Image (tube, grey):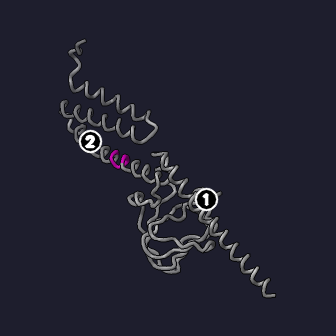
Amino acid sequence: MSIPSWIHLADVFGFIGAVFYIGTYAMKTMVPLRIFGIASNFFFLTYGLLNASYPTFFLYSILLPLNTVRLIQMLQLIKRVESAVAGDLSMDWLKPFMSKRNCKQGEILFRKGDRAEEMFYTVTGGFLLIESGIKIPHGHVVGELGLLAPDNRRTQSLECVEAGEILTISYEKVKELYFQNPSFGFFFLRLTSGRLMQNIVNLENELAKRRQAQDMAAAHR
């Protein structure tokens, strides 16, 4: 089947680019959307070159590498999340999506009952969850339970006991990462479950100490 004479090669590339562009609106997840976007950018770029449409060529010569870079970043994120789900709970791979913040000794980052909008990653310094007495070591996440708590309220208070640096990420960004890659949800579940289990163990230890103290007091009466 021959192509009608009124259709030029440039138009063929333009039509194919349009098909892929329309396809991006049908995508429900980010990776296939980027792939369709890259294909659309390529065909529109070729269309602009063959048709001597330099504004079109200029536009898609920028969008093509931009979409390619974003796709590579997303694939790297998926790979890191899958690795994290398998066992790494450090969340180092989230650093590129976080913002730096310096904290002074004695500063209260949030109080129990406060509205929670972000979680933190400790880099340097010392931090303490006041109610449970849990010290947060370097390279750990804190403040993640607020995302799951009723009305997004803080379940404990966090104090900076030694000046240092933390990284922050908003819950909106966390939700965005979740919807872009549902595997992140499994990782986040493991993270929060680990924190809850740690709180339970600390509570059991505290109750055991109180019982021991009561038994010793009763024995000396």
Which quarter of the rendering shows the N terminus? top left
| Whole-number angstrom distance, CA of label 1 to CA of label 2 | 42 Å
Read off the residue under disc 2: 59
Q: Position of residue 143 (x, y in %)?
A: 54, 64
Residue 95 % position (x, y): 40, 61
Q: Answer above or below: position of 77 versus 8.
A: below
Q: Is residue 42 left or right of residue 196?
A: left
Instruction: Please tell me whether mark 1 sits on a helix, a strand or a loop.
Output: helix
Q: Mark 1 highlights which residue?
A: 152
Disc 1 + disc 2, Cβ < 8 Å: no
Q: Nearer the viewer, residue 217 or 47?
A: 217
Image position of 80 (left or right of 132):
left
Residue situated in front as seen by the camera: 12 or 158: 158
Question: Magenta residues?
Answer: 71-75
Image quadrant holding the C terminus, namely: bottom right
Type of amino acid under label 1:
Asn
* Foreground disc of the pair 1, 2: 1
Residue occupying image coordinates x 41% and y 67% = 100
